[in-house]
Image (cartoon, rainbow, N blue to C red):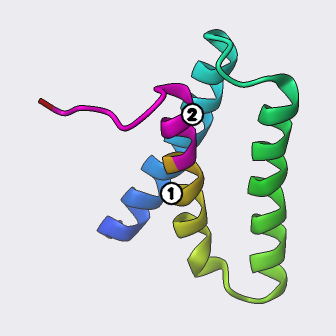
Amino acid sequence: MIGSATIGAWIALGLFWLLLGFAWAFGELSLRGRLVFVGLWLASNLTLRAWNASDFFPSVVALLDVVLVLIVFKGDIRLT
């Protein structure tokens, strides 16, 4: 059975790539900026695997998601 932490990790990962696509499509982030985010994603993945701390990877991706939301939408998203 899949736990809620696993589902949250998949949502964060999907949202990361979706937000990078939005940043590219709407020109909110330059090529260099997108490469920086992909580099941070890759470096954190490889580093946390090397340190046997892969459980922290979804948290890192969620932080990258927050920064991407702030960049792409020029601030926080209003829910109301």
Q: Residues within 10 Å of mark 2 (few under 14, many from 20)?
A: some
Residue in view at x 58 percent, y 20 percent: 22
Q: Which of the 4 image quarters holds residue 50?
A: bottom right
Q: Residue furthest front?
A: 75
Asked if the residues shown at circle 1 and circle 2 are in contact, with their CB atoms under 8 angstroms apart, the answer is no
**Secondary structure beneath label 1:** helix
**Secondary structure beneath label 2:** helix
Q: The residue under label 1 is which amino acid type? A: Ala
The residue tagged 1 is 62
Q: Quadrant of the N terminus?
A: bottom left
Q: In the rendered image of this protein, does residue 43 appear above or below residue 16?
A: below
Residue 1 visible to the viewer: no
The residue tagged 2 is 71
Q: Nearer the viewer, mark 1 or mark 2?
A: 2
Q: Quadrant of the C terminus?
A: top left
Mark nearer the N terminus (1 vs 2) = 1
Image position, residue 59 (x, y; %): 52, 68
Specify whether residue 10 is painted magenta. Answer: no
Q: Which of the 4 image quarters holds residue 71?
A: top right
- Rounded to the nearest angstrom, the CA distance separating label 1 from label 2 is 14 Å
Image position, residue 30 (x, y; %): 80, 23
Q: Residue furthest top?
A: 26
Q: The residue under label 2 is which amino acid type? A: Ile
Instruction: State which region is magenta.
Output: 67-79
Q: Which mark is residue 41?
A: none
Image position, residue 49 (x, y; %): 78, 78
